Image (cartoon, grey):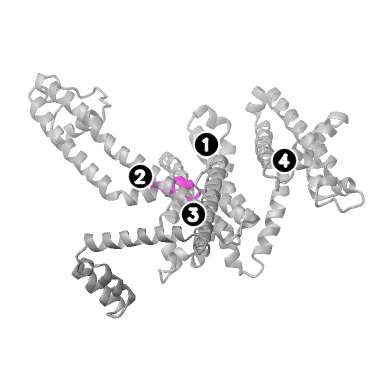
Amino acid sequence: MLYYWFFDTANTNGFAKLVEKAIAWLIVVSVFSIVLEHIPEVQALYLGELHVFDIIAVGIFTVEYLFRWFTAPNNPDYANFKYPRLRHLVGIYAVVDLVAIAPFYIALFMTVDVELLRVLRLFRLFRMFKFSRLLIPAVGEFLELNKNNTFRQKIYSLLEPTDQSGKLQIYFDNFIVFWVAVSIICVLIESVNSVHQIFYLLFQWVDVVTFTIFTIEYLARLYVAPENPAFNQFKWKRLGYAKSNQALIDLVTILPFILEAIITYQVDLRFLRVFRLMRLLKLTRYSSATQTLGGVLKREKPIILSAMFVLFLLILLTASLGYLLEHDAQPDVFTNIPQSIYWAMTTLSSVGYGDMTPVTPLGRMMTSVVALIGVGIFAIPAGVLASAFTDQLQQDREALKRKVAKIFATGTLNQESLLEINKEAERLHISTSSRQRIMDEAEREYKESQAGKAQFSGLIINVLDHPEYASQQFQTLIDQLLFLITASEAQNLQFDLSKQYGSDSDELKIFNLLSPQSID
């Protein structure tokens, strides 16, 4: 029962995925705390807190180790062995789990000298190998899916989601996102001088590691560009990729490090360090929300441009009037119209910093009117974007619903199709409850449509047993045909029927029988 609820990833009702995520985050945080322990300033201030956290982490890892050992008979990997728990203990995953906690217990129950204690503390970094429980199966799956592919196709499947990607591609994306987040956090906090002095060396190492990772990723994406269908229209596919927005973003994220290394003479390089914040844009590749927003902006471009044009005209008009009304009273403030544009923008946006304020009665009256107008003007593009974004999300959900309905219609609802639905739902940021509701609605509509077809089919088949139904249906069809003939031009309809079906067709004969001339 423990294995079924906490370690069986195939059980969608259990907590296996939550346990995996929690353990993964605990590994990351515990490794980070070990790194902090070796910084003298942090060690002097927070050694007690770090030690308490280490005890908690080891306790959780120990409980996990014991639970996995206890539930080994229920694990399909060991269930067929005579002694499943013993087989589990000598398995690679159990050995890694043991190595992750062993240094703590060795130092706790044995007398060790200072050098051995230092080695044992460093050995705690082996906790990172606990990720092997996720990576080894993912690598095996990836190799199996790509056994017939070339090396370049394998790299492409690793970088981009394809039918041959598997879970390894998701882990790779998470790996890149993690290092983007780490690098951004470091850029932000190293601007604090006191923090920068303490973690100077750590920041340098993080910068080197992130530069290496992002450079390898950029070169790999450049290498596999010919495999990407998005660049098939280019003769030189790698050049086409190099000119794409995502490639330029990837290039910008590594340029600051290169320029800092090249520029050796004394100049202020702070602007280059701040420029590393452009790495945030790398996250647009991994977020469907930004892709959806890009599609919305492209679709609503005419409306947004129209609203921006009206806003631009209003800013110029307001600035010109402000200059005319206030220049004589405040020649040093409203110096010219370009200077007044700044005041017009702050007034229309209802920000009003107060550094430029009208003093004449007409100027203040105009400012009040403009501020009220600005509330509505700035709301137009915001409302358009919000409405279009919501509409796009609804379209995406309807598309997912149609895909689910198609799966029900083809009768291929299996584990593979469920994984496809879950993947699409995750891409659209649809919650588990919403995804289940979409599947239930699609299944209900499919059953209703099938029931309707069956009922209609049954009515036609049993028409001899129920002639009154046939008579009613016949009368309804006659009424509809008469309505069509009466509502349309009879001559035009007759000509179209003759042209489409022929002069001797049954359709034209029925028309001649039902036309007003024939009835009369």
Residue named by callout 2: 388
Q: Position of residue 54 (x, y in %)?
A: 73, 30
Q: CA distance from mark 3 to mark 1?
A: 41 Å
Label annotation for residue 125: 4
Q: Is residue 496 above or below residue 332?
A: below
Q: CA distance from mark 3 to mark 4?
A: 48 Å
Q: CA distance from mark 2 to mark 1?
A: 33 Å
282 relative to 474 in the view: left or right: right
Query: Looking at the image, which residue is at 13% across and 25% down?
Result: 366
Question: Pointers 2 and 3 in contact (CB under 8 A)?
Answer: no
Tell me which amino acid carries mark 2: Ala
Query: Looking at the image, which residue is at 47% across and 45% down?
Result: 279
Label 4 vs label 2, nearer the camera:
2
Q: Is residue 56 magenta?
A: no
Q: Is residue 113 above or below residue 233?
A: above
Of callouts 4 and 2, which one flags the residue occurring earlier in the amino acid sequence? 4
Residue 264 appears in the figure: no
Of callouts 2 and 1, which one flags the residue occurring earlier in the amino acid sequence? 1
